[in-house]
Amino acid sequence: MEEHKSETGRVCVTGAGGFIASWLVKLLLSKGYKVHGTVRDPSNEKNDHLKKLDKATENLQLFKAELLDYNTVEAAISGCEGVFHVASPVILSGISNPEEELIKPALVGTKNVLKACSKANVKRVVVVSSVAAIASNPDWPQGTIMDENCWSDEEFCKSTEVIYLLYLRIWILGV
C-alpha cells in the first residue's frame, strides 16, 4: 500500500498476533495507519506485545475474531480501506484429516475475509502466503532461486508427513 500519513487511513490485519502479522502491524502503526487487528482473544497475554507497540494506544484496535465466523470478520473489516489477510490455520503434525483441519478452514476463512472486504468496499486486499509453499522440494537445484515455478513436492510432503506444506501447495495451486 502507498504510504499514508493521514489519520483517516484504516487497515485490518488478520491474525495480528502472529509473527509476520505483528511486524506488519508495527510497520503500519509507524506509517500513521489506524489498525484493526484480529485475534482470537484480545485479553490473552500472548497479544500483549501488540498493545506495547509505538502508537498502539491511540491507533490499534484488537477485535476478537474467528475467521470461520463471518460476523466477527465483518466487524473487524468494517470501515477499513485496506486488508492484509495473514491469518491461516497452522498445524505442523498430528493431522488426521487435512481437508477438514487445514484446507476447509483456510478456504472458508479467506472467503469470509473477501466477502467482508467486498461489503465494506475495501480498496485493496493483500492475501499473504508462506515460504512453506515452496520450501520442501528436495529436487530443486541447489543454488537456484525459488520462484513461482518451485512448489513443495507433494510426494515428499506426504512421505515426511508434513501435511501443512502439502496443504499450502493445494491451497495456492489448487492441485
Image (spheres, rainbow, N blue to C red):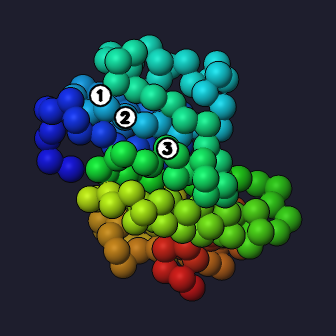
- Kind of residue at disc 3: Ala
Residue 29 shows which numbered tag? 1
- In the image, residue 34 lies at what x, y percent? 31, 32
Q: Nearer the viewer, residue 81 or 32?
A: 81
Reading the chain from its start, which is encountered first: label 2 or label 3? 2
Q: Where on the picture, by quarter, is residue 7?
A: top left
Say which quadrant the C terminus sits in: bottom right
Q: CA separation, marks 1 and 2?
A: 7 Å
Residue located at (32% from left, 70% from top):
147
Q: Nearer the viewer, mark 3 or mark 1?
A: 3
Q: Which residue is mark 3?
A: 76
Residue located at (71% from left, 53% from top):
91
Q: Total label count? A: 3
Q: Secondary structure at mark 1?
A: helix
Residue located at (77% from left, 69% from top):
100
**In contact (CB < 8 Å): disc 2 and disc 3:** no
Q: Is residue 4 visible?
A: yes
- Kind of residue at disc 1: Leu
Residue 35 shows which numbered tag? 2
Location of residue 16 with respect to 14 vertically, above or below: above
Mark 2, residues whose alpha carbon is within 10 Å: few (<14), some, or many (≥20)? many
